[in-house]
Amino acid sequence: MLKIFIVRGFSTVVKRPKVKLSKADVIKRLNYENKALFGAVIKPTAKRKTKTKSTEQVTLPKTTAHPVVESEYTSEIFWQSRNFSRVKTPNGDGGENESYPTGLVIPFTDKELQTITKFPLVPSDRGIVESQWKLHEQHESDQYKSPSVNRILSATMPEASRQALIRWKTSKIAELGEEGFQLLQKEIFARGSTLHATLETWLSGCDPSEEAIEKTGILWRSVSGALKDVERPAKLIEQKLYHPYLHYNGVADCITSIKGHYHVIEWKTSDNPKTSVGATYDAPVQLCAYLGALQANGEHCDSRIQKGAIFVAYTSGKPANVHILEPSEMRRYWLQWLHRVQEYWTRYRDGTLPEPI
C-alpha cells in the first residue's frame, strides 16, 4: 500500500505542468523544502561575556567604581598619573618615573594591614585608635621607604585607566617619536609647574607680576576669576606632609579659607570640561590623603580643616570649575584612599606591584 502511495505521488509530480518560477519563488520553495526535511532553523542564544579569572590569586580589598576613562588620550590622562608639585617629597620623589619597590618586609603587622581601612581621617577622641598603631618617626628605613600619594595612586589605578594610559603613550610615541614624546612630557610638566608658581605668589598675598601672568597665559585667565572667595595669605602652601601611622608622604597644594571655612585645595588643569567631581578622577582621593596626613601630624593638625576643594583651570581659557567637598564626602573618599593604601602595601609585600608606565 505504501509503495502504491509513493508511486502515485511521484507520478503526480511528474505530470505537473512546467511553470517558470522567479528567483524569489525558487528560494521560497527551497526554504520550504529544507524546513520540511530538516525542521526550522534554531538561532543560537547570545553568549554572555564572562570575565576571565586571573591565575594570580592575591587577596586585595574591593575598590570603589571609578569614572570611565575618556576616549581621547590627551595629555590630561598622562597628567592625572603624575604629581606637578614643585616641592620634592621627603623621599626625594619629585614625580619621576622610578621603579616601584617590591619585597616582603612592610611597616605594618598583619593585623594593622587588615585594619588600615578603619583609620580615622581626623584624630579620634583622646587618640584611642592611634595609640594602637606604631608611630613611624622616620620616613625611611633600611628595608623600605614611604611611598608618595602619587606613587600609591599610580600603582593602584584601575586597570581600565592603566590600559588607556598605555595606549595613549604608545600612540604618542608612534606619532612624535621618542624625543618628541620626551619634549611633550616636559611641556606638560612645565604647564602645571608654571601655574603652581603663579598661584603660590598670589596665595602668599602678593599679586603676580605681568611677566608671570603672561607666562601662565590662558590658564591664569581661566582660574583667576575663581579666586574671588579664596582667602590670602594662605595657611599653608606647597606643604610637605608625612603620615606617621600609615607611612606615606605627599605635598598639599594649598590650605586656606574659602568663604570663611578652611579647605585643602588641589589645583588641576584640563583640556576637557570637568563639570563634576567624578570627572576629576583621583583628585578627591588625593585631597583626603593630604588631609589625613595633615591631621595625623601634631605640628599641622587643625580640627577646623575638614573640607576640600578642586579648582580645574582649562587650557581653552574657559572659566575654571570649582568643586567643593563637604566633610561627609571627604570621609567617603578617605575610605577609598585607605583601600588604595591597603592594596599598595599588600602588593608590595607579595611582590605584585605593576611596572610604572
Image (cartoon, helix red, strand yellow):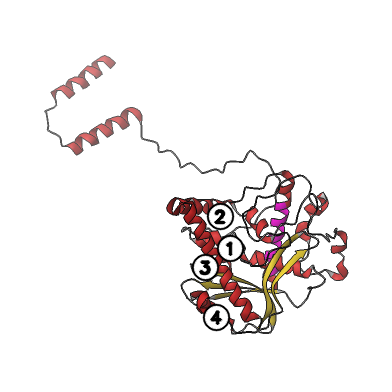
> Magenta segment range?
330-344
Q: Earlier in the sequence, mark 1 or mark 3?
A: 3
- Residue under label 3: 270
Element at label 2: helix
Are the residues at dot 1 and dot 2 in contact (C-beta closer than 8 Å)?
A: yes
Give the image quarter of residue 140. Answer: bottom right
- Residue under label 1: 281
- Residue under label 4: 224
Q: From this view, report whether residue 309 is shown above or below residue 95.
A: below
Residues packed near mark 3 inside 10 Å, few (<14), some (14 to 19) or many (20 plus): many
Q: Position of residue 309 (x, y in %)?
A: 63, 74
Residues packed near mark 2 inside 10 Å, few (<14), some (14 to 19) or many (20 plus): some
- Residue under label 2: 161
Q: Is residue 324 magenta?
A: no
308 on left or right of 179: right
Q: Earlier in the sequence, mark 2 or mark 4?
A: 2
Are the residues at dot 1 and dot 3 in contact (C-beta closer than 8 Å)?
A: no
Element at label 3: strand
Count of number-bearing discs: 4
Q: Earlier in the sequence, mark 3 or mark 4?
A: 4
Identity, as a three-letter code, of the amino acid under mark 1: Tyr
Question: Does residue 111 appear anywhere in the picture?
Answer: yes
Q: Position of residue 310 (x, y in %)?
A: 61, 72
